[in-house]
Image: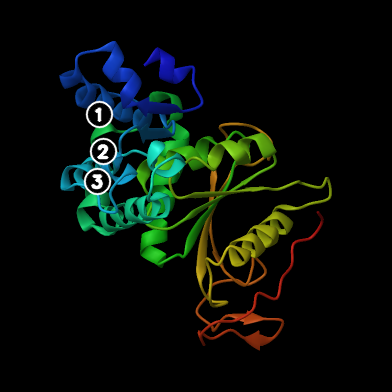
Amino acid sequence: AAVIAASDGCMVARGDLGVEMAIEWVPIVQRDIIAECRRQGKPVIVATQMLESMIDSPIPTRAEASDIANAIFDGADAVMLSAESASGRYPLEAVVMQQRIINKVEDSPRYLDDIRARVEKEGADPKHVCADSIVSAAMNIAVANKAKVVIAFTASGSTAARASRCRMHVPVVAMTPSLKTARALALYWGVFPEALSRLPTDSFDDLLRRACSVAWDKGFAADLTDKFVVTAGLPFGRTGEANVIRVLPAAGPQVVFDDTPLELDGMPLQPSGPQTMPLKPSGP
């Protein structure tokens, strides 16, 4: 636990583990490492011999398919090929096969149910009570409003990391002023980071407009009346200060939800298939 706490992420390299311990201990230690990484909100990658037979064969064994599936069911953020794609005879087929297995597991209802049941059992981490509470509320709000995406303004990446741990049913766009944080968040499951430089003159609504535009650019909205859930910490710039949740139409913060049809610049917004986002980011 102390090693993981001091790390930015963890790789479960089964080849190295097999040298350091008896072979029968490797799957047990693998699950323990994944569980601890999940508890701490650190990304974890499982590697080594994922599709070993595909170095020489165009089709993997059933046991290899189950190995990949079990790593994903346990909560790994990523699974990694090595010799299969680096020096094998079927590198493209190996990558396609691994992606097929990943997609099938993540499409399974049991996948999200098992992960979320585990998160509920673990409860909020004492070190991340605020972020976990905000993430839990945002997830429930996103479900209730059929939101297309959760947009998280985050300085340190903590909110987005805790959201990834919960395996939200919608993508998480992490807006951060730190390029280093954005790059680190690229490892997290379901998180799409975006480095966002904030101008001194930017208001909260200015940042919301830019966030909506980013969500459109990433293809997470198809209609102006689609909904986004936004989390942020005010004032900006402080870590661990997530304290705001807001529901926005994809048209931007200047459109207000009420009992009347949504309007933008006096024109009614009606669901009518794909539309073009009329707003562009302000500033660089």
Residue at 29% over, 39% down: 52
Task: Using the numbered discs, state the Cα–Cα distance from disc 1 to disc 3 in whole angstroms.
Answer: 13 Å
CB within 8 Å, label 3 to label 2:
no
Question: What kind of element bears circle 3?
Answer: helix
Residue located beneath label 1 in the image = 31
Specify the label residue 266 is tagged with: none
Determine whether label 1 and label 2 are within 8 Å by CB: yes
Q: Residue at x 60, y 33 (%)?
A: 156
Q: Is the Cβ of the residue at disc 1 closer than 8 Å to that at disc 3?
A: no
Q: Nearer the viewer, residue 249 or 155?
A: 155
> Which x, y percent locates residue 256?
60, 71
Q: Position of residue 74 (x, y in %)?
A: 26, 38
The image quarter containing residue 97 is bottom left
Residue denoted by label 3: 69
* On screen, residue 87 above or below 59: above
SS class, disc 2: helix
Residue 141 appears left or right of 69: right
Direction from residue 282 to residue 250 in the image, left or right: left
